[in-house]
Image (tube, helix red, strand yellow):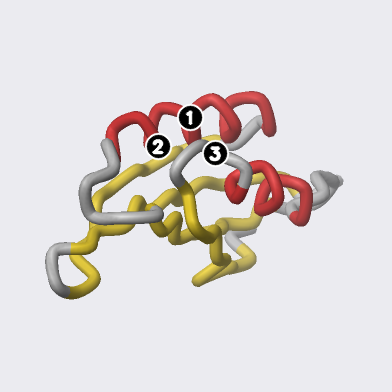
Amino acid sequence: MSGINGAKYKLMPVSPEVNLKAIEESAKKIVEEFGGKNKEYSIELIAFGLKAVIVFFFYSDDKDIETIEEKFSKIKNVASAQLIDMRKIA
């Protein structure tokens, strides 16, 4: 039986003018394909008008989480994708 983990990623746009909703929609598709559950998406103010998309979801132990970070970083207008929190849920 596999356990459940939670992961939170910060997706930084290339500039403050980037459409964050487009980044969020692309991230949603990646999380859905990955099989993520209990998904949450939010916009976080970083500094000087720059905002980041925060992606949180649950996933099972048998999934390779490293592949999703690479996919997030390939989203159009994303400068970086960083894992900022990971927890064992059950």
Q: Where is residue 16, by image quadrant?
A: bottom left
The residue located at (58%, 68%) in the rendering is 87
Q: Where is residue 5, by image quadrant?
A: bottom right
Amino acid at pointer 3: Ile
**x and y percent of residue 56 in the render?**
45, 51
Q: Are marks 2 and 3 in contact (CB under 8 Å)?
A: yes
**x and y percent of residue 79 in the render?**
49, 57
In this picture, is 52 found above or below 26? below
Q: Are marks 3 and 1 in contact (CB under 8 Å)?
A: yes
Amino acid at pointer 1: Ser
Disc 2 crowd, CA 10 A, few/some/many (<14, 14-19, 20+): many
Q: Quadrant of the C terminus?
A: bottom right
In this picture, is 63 found above or below 29? below
**x and y percent of residue 6 in the render?**
56, 57
Amino acid at pointer 2: Ile
**x and y percent of residue 3 in the render?**
74, 53
Mark 2 highlights which residue?
Answer: 23
Mark 3 highlights which residue?
Answer: 75
Between disc 2 and disc 3, whose residue precedes?
2
Q: Is residue 80 left or right of residue 2?
A: left
Q: CA distance from mark 3 to mark 1?
A: 7 Å
Q: CA distance from mark 2 to mark 1?
A: 5 Å
Mark 1 highlights which residue?
Answer: 26
Disc 3 crowd, CA 10 A, few/some/many (<14, 14-19, 20+): some
Q: Secondary structure at mark 3?
A: loop
Between disc 3 and disc 1, whose residue precedes?
1
Q: Is residue 43 left or right of residue 80?
A: left
The answer to which of 63 and 89 lies nearer the viewer is 63
